Amino acid sequence: CNFPAMVNTHDMMAKMAPGGTFLLNTSVPADKIWDTLPLEMQEAMIEKDVKLRVVNALKVAREAGMGGRVNTVMQACFFALSNIIPQSEAIAAIRSSVVKTYGKKGQDVVDRNFAAIDMSLESLAEVHYPKQLTSDHEMVHHVWEHKGNAGSHLPVQAALAKTIEPIIFNKGN
């Protein structure tokens, strides 16, 4: 997950396979992240025995001289964890892609991307979480309260909730 706030609004575990791995881009350290996750996510991760990995992709990208461009960092972490192809082959393929994509922009751009790849693998951290719920919050299920004072729905807010909330919470068709 590239956007940490989404764990509070999207059910990231809905399609997670038992024993799967969840990669989270976050500035929260590995030893503190568990308590920041919503209760529903913690419960599903415990139930499915999910492996949790974190990386501060923005910090890595900035330290590599790439500003806020985190795609290379997240891509390297994804392929390092996914076992789709052996990690060494994946990293070699990403490096080759960097040369092909950014080579015409200069060796400096290529070198910064290579540094980001190397630093991302070094920064990737495994989270050893307790098999218990520790969060103090649940996921956000509604953008706003749309009931009137008398308990009836306000027509405009109800219509917006019906159309906008499914988009925000990725529940559209």
Image (cartoon, rainbow, N blue to C red):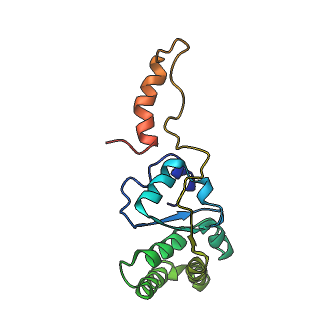
Q: Name the residue located 40 percent from the left edge and 67 percent from the top edge.
A: 20
Q: Quadrant of the C terminus?
A: top left
Question: In the figure, 71 relative to 153: above or below?
Answer: below
Quick one: which residue is furthest to the right in this view?
A: 63
Viewer-side residue, 99 vs 52: 52
Where residue 87 appears, as percent x and y from the top left, is 44, 84
Residue reaching furthest to the top: 150
Which quadrant of the structure image shows residue 12? Answer: bottom left
Which x, y percent locates residue 166?
41, 38
Looking at the image, residue 125 sits to the left or right of residue 14; the answer is right
The residue under the point 56% across, 62% down is: 130
Q: Position of residue 102 (x, y in %)?
A: 51, 78
The number of numbered badges drawn on the structure is: 0
Res. 116 image quadrant: bottom right
Image point (44%, 35%), residue name: 164
- Image quadrant of residue 105? bottom right
Q: Position of residue 52 (x, y in %)?
A: 51, 66
**Near-viewer residue (134 or 21):** 134
Q: Is residue 127 above or below residue 83?
A: above
